Amino acid sequence: MQGPWMRRCFVCPSQALQFLHKLTSQITIDIFFIDWERPKGKVLKAVEGEGGVRSATIPVSIWRTYFVANEWNEIQTVRKINPLFQVLIVLFFLEVVGFKNLALMDSSSSLSRNPPSYIAPYSRILRYAVSTALWLVIGIIQIVFFAVFYERFIEDKIRQFVDLCCMSNISVFLLSHKCFGYYIHGRSVHGHADTNMEEMNMNLKREAENLCSQRGLVPNTEGQTFQIAVSSQMRQHYDRIHETLIRKNGPARLLSSSASTFEQSIKAYHTMNKFLASFIDHVHKEMDYFIKDKLLLERILGVEFMEPMEKSIFYNDEGYSFSSVLYYGNEATLLIYDLLFFCVVDLACQNFILAAFLTYLQQEIFRFIRNTVGQKNLASKTLVDQRFLI
């Protein structure tokens, strides 16, 4: 009996490593919010010390970027199942309904046992099988309910985020690997998003009545989400600007003053925003890109056969696969990891209640780590003040 149990326990470390690898990659991604908003004009501004006035460009509001950053921060740990509900329902069926009795080493298939009568010992293999089957069935039911009903009729946070980007005139540039990532095209079809309520409602009405262009990156299309494979030249240029962006986190002795550091960061932010916006607009011919669909085999295998040598490649992505840098896109990994953690604790302690408690506890610990470190990474990479991420 011990042999098969021990072989199953060896599955957990590999699954734990996969989970930790995904967690680490998610909290270290490169991300930047491209603000497409442009100044609407100029105003007269007093010049300190001179007693005169001069014309100055009306500054673009940063609140839209803060708002989008907050929404991204909130969806980082959104899942397709409710972890607490999952643990409680599994525990209910095992302990209250009596499914744990199916793991006894006797020939009875009854879910209830008469206490005065003889009760056979538990089989570790059967405990593993019963708890695994229950966990997977309840998890799959939750996922199906979430996809078929909840996202359709109540709330779809991933698609809502893409809509929010477009209404805010903010695009999201993500690099989950050295030269691979995702792009959410949020450039407003109305030119400006920093406007009043009346004009905002008018813009929405025009879109509903098809009186304006479509939101897609390619004219007359709706495609807003892409998988991107960037060229090494583009990545090197991105890294050079990015180094200036994060220089404020360096040793204090290397910095002349906090004021100059802040000014450097602001300058780097505008440089990055200008570079990425011009890259999307095909301004840099030496770092240009083209858009294509993935081949069927590429979709099936989840790989790209073409290398971005001279030009970067944007792959049309209708599946919102940028969610793979969030909990949302890794539900299968999370579900199986929680299942194996639950089973290993139960097999070691022979106690479903303790296993359920520890499983939920580790879920909350990792969720806290994902939120906290992910928030710091978001603030560091985008220059959004962490105090505004609530």
Image (cartoon, rainbow, N blue to C red):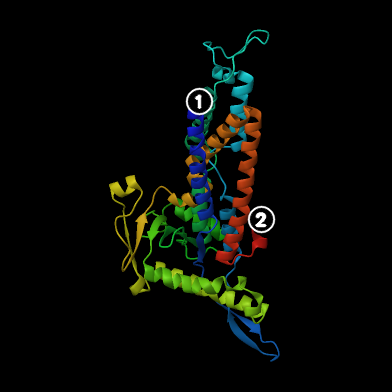
x and y, in percent, of residue 237 in the image: 43, 73
The quadrant of the rendering that contains the C terminus is: bottom right
Residue name at image x 64 percent, y 49 percent: 368
Residue name at image x 61 percent, y 72 percent: 250
Q: Nearer the viewer, mark 2 or mark 1?
A: 1
In the foreground, 208 or 380: 380
The circle on residue 129 is 1
| Element class at badge 2 | loop
Q: Could you classify mark 2 by the number of other residues whose Cα lies within 10 Å: few (under 14), some (14-19), or many (20 or more)? A: few
- The amino acid on which the numbered mark 2 sits, given as a three-letter code, is Ile
Q: Where is residue 55, by image quadrant?
A: bottom right
Q: Where is 239 relative to 370, above or below?
A: below
Q: How many marks?
A: 2
Query: Which residue is tagged 2?
Result: 390
Q: Where is 326 relative to 306, above or below?
A: above
- Tags 2 and 1 in contact by the CB under 8 Å rule? no
Q: Is residue 75 visible?
A: yes
Q: Where is 115 relative to 84, above or below?
A: above
In the foreground, 81 or 215: 81
The circle on residue 61 is none
x and y, in percent, of residue 211 in the image: 42, 56
Q: Where is residue 265, by image quadrant?
A: bottom right
Q: Farthest residue toward the bottom?
A: 50
x and y, in percent, of residue 245 in the image: 55, 72
In the foreground, 245 or 111: 111
Q: Farthest residue toward the top?
A: 117
- The amino acid on which the numbered mark 1 sits, given as a three-letter code, is Ala
Residue name at image x 38 percent, y 64 percent: 230
Q: Where is residue 42, by image quadrant?
A: bottom right
x and y, in percent, of residue 179 in the image: 40, 62
| Element class at badge 1 | helix
Q: Is residue 152 visible?
A: no
